[in-house]
Image (cartoon, rainbow, N blue to C red):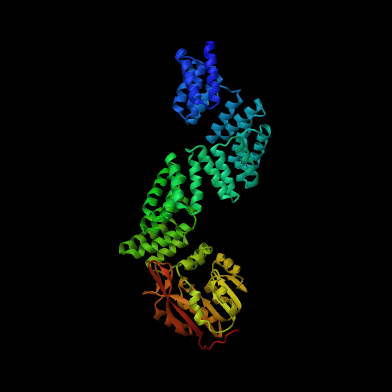
Amino acid sequence: MTNNADVILNTAFAAYNADDLDQAEALARQVLATEPANGDALYLLGLVAWRAGALEPAESLLYQAVRLYPAAENYALMLASVLEARGALDEALDFYRKFPNNPAALVQIGLIEARRGRLSFADSAFLRALELDAKVAGALVGLAQTARKRGQNKKALSYLEQAVTATPNYPDAWYQMAVQCRLMRQEDRALKAVNKAVALNPLPVFLIEQGLILEALGHPDEAFSSYRRATDTDAGFAQGWYYQGNLLRDKGNNAAAEAAYKRAIQIAPDFFDAVHNLADVLYRLGRVNEALETLRQAILINPESDTARYNLAVMLEDAGSFEEALGLYFNVLVRQNKKAPQEIEWRIAACLTALGRLSKQGYKTAVRFAQGWVKHFPDSVIAAHMLAALTHHASEKAAAYAQALYDAFADTYDAKMRQLAADVCGLFAPFLTQKSYQHVLDLGCGTGACGKRFKPIFQTLTGVDVSKNMIEKARLTGAYDTLKHADAMTFLKTTKHRFDLVLAADVICYMDDLKGVLSGIRRVLAPAGLGVFSVETGAQDGLSETGRYVWRRETVEKALAGVGLIPEKIIASPLRREGAGQAEGLIIAVRAGKTDKKEAV
């Protein structure tokens, strides 16, 4: 190398360090024009290409430098870095391993091994780096990451504390500490760590972490600023646009969220989360066909995503494509087996009901599907009950089905009833004409809607429900003096108490023995006691495709007479919205007739 070349290259490296890549490249090429084998010039051009994101040219230039000067450690390590960035991990490892006593090379070996899931190999490389230099922060950070992957969070945090102590100005150590603290729910400490990382080097990935921590702390506007700063720093940073989209969606600004997600997808077409969430905002915007197509694209990107399958099924169900929705729900159910949330089974049940009502062919398809469901999941109470409902057979699982239903929907039951315009308790009000009732039974009390509404006229109130979750919801109303977790029929047959008033709202429809439950109500009514209850009606007696029992009016009146209950009033009334129509029913008020048996009080 001539003295003139040395001077030019010194100037070129200075330009590179000052981020003047054009000047650095021009000067390096000037040297190569006279000295084609100048290793430093090739190396510098490789650095320039690397900084510009041109990995293939960087690799080619650095390979030339390494071939000319195989002993030049900096050339080989830079080539290994480029190969690693390109995903050529085996080739990168070959070069890193040429320098077994170089701590930086050992750290990279460890990171690649950790990336491959070979954690013990990774730890060996990191520990060897620390033997050579106890203050290699990268090795400590690497050990923290492998400890985190093993679930050893306290150990990971300890390594990171050592790293920031050893090298306080190493931004990646502060960044990893922020990640670790956030995972450990130490958000305040995480924020301090990430702020330090950002102050040292405002990389987009650090800014994203800052935003995530701010979100966790309940500061969405500040989080959005961090995400915006990430894309201002690098407009091609897809994650920044994605997280902006999430916050915009959360605020209900779906149009802006759509634009943000599309920017992320434009940069990274296979960005599954962005495609998945874009489908959601398109659906919220009422563009159903676009949403369905986008969600299908998400599944192509990640065929293992049961979440995407489930959400596509929900959209299809809402759009009335019940058969396709059923296929997707069942696919998720089979894939997850016992780990599947029970909500999927309830979705399947709703689709079967809707499909069975569409047409004769839809009904046949629904029955075949239910038969397959029972075959694959013989222990499923919901499957067995729905097959019985579709084929109009008596269900052996009626009580267990009701318990599963109300346990599953306790948290959302009241909202769902409002959505369906269901207010059976309100329909009871005209029948409760006394100013006060002494001993009251709320049979199938559910969340306590009737107890809460009529508590001012009840002196002592007992609630009974088959669902533990419903009992806990009813307890929160403060309306009940006694709450019993029990099957309604068992309670009616065994209780020694008698009641001046018995209410049964939306409970008889889940009981297969109409005469039995009416006889039970007759048994627990005190002399002159009043019973008020709802019965769902239909053209045929028995279990309907909705999974609920319906009865003809004449069957109900005959059963009342048969058990000694005298109707004071029977009013036909819609009970709730049901698909495109109404679930019809009766609101019945009865008194106990005379009996030869001596009643216990």
Q: Is residue 365 left or right of residue 35?
A: left
Q: Quadrant of residue 501?
A: bottom right
- Say if 546 sits above or below 199 in the image: below
Q: Quadrant of the C terminus?
A: bottom right
| x and y percentages locating residue 226 in the rendered image | 55, 43
Q: Is residue 191 left or right of residue 382?
A: right
x 57%, y 85%: residue: 599
* Most foreground residue, 176 or 493: 176
| x and y percentages locating residue 31 in the rendered image | 48, 15
Q: Residue furthest top?
A: 2
- Say if 387 sits above or below 294 in the image: below
Residue 309 visible in the current orientation: no
How many numbered marks are there? 0
Q: Is residue 2 left or right of residue 552?
A: right
x 58%, y 40%: residue: 149
| x and y percentages locating residue 488 in the rendered image | 53, 73
* Most foreground residue, 382 or 160: 160
Residue 355 visible in the current orientation: yes
| x and y percentages locating residue 47 in the rendered image | 51, 24
x 40%, y 44%: residue: 300
